[in-house]
Amino acid sequence: MGIGWFAAIIIGGLAGWLAGILMEMRFGVLMNIVIGMVGAVLANAIFTRADIHVANGWLGYLVTGFIGSCILLFFAKLVRR
């Protein structure tokens, strides 16, 4: 059971925004949404491969999106240097 597209956009934006604050990289609303959603997909793939289970629903998606977004922003900082 998924959370729906609208909720995915809102939660992805929140996850991207929180990761941007933590990683000290500021983006606009659209980039926060993209980074959060791509980060969630990335982290979900990593967690599935490592057999790590995160909570379901919006909280699990937020945590997964946040962790994945931090990973994406970490590599973005490496590329910028």
Image: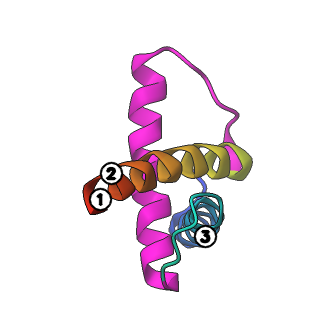
> 54 left or right of 34?
right
Q: Which residue is mark 2?
A: 78
What residue appears at the point 42 percent right and 76 percent down from the top-left corner?
Answer: 31
Q: Which residue is mark 3?
A: 17
Picture layout, residue 13 above or below residue 57: below
Q: Nearer the viewer, residue 58 or 66?
A: 66
Query: Along the polypeptide, which appears first: circle 3 or circle 2?
Result: 3
Secondary element at tag 1: loop
Q: Amino acid at mark 1?
A: Arg
Quarter in which the N terminus is drawn: top right
Q: Position of residue 78 (x, y in %)?
A: 33, 51
Q: Residues within 10 Å of mark 3 (few under 14, many from 20)?
A: many
Cα distance between the residues tagged 2 and 1: 6 Å
Q: How many marks?
A: 3
Q: Magenta segment, which residues?
A: 28-57
Q: Are marks 3 and 2 in contact (CB under 8 Å)?
A: no
Q: Nearer the viewer, residue 48 or 74?
A: 74
Q: Residues within 10 Å of mark 1 (few under 14, many from 20)?
A: few
Q: Amino acid at mark 3?
A: Trp
Q: Position of residue 48 (x, y in %)?
A: 45, 23
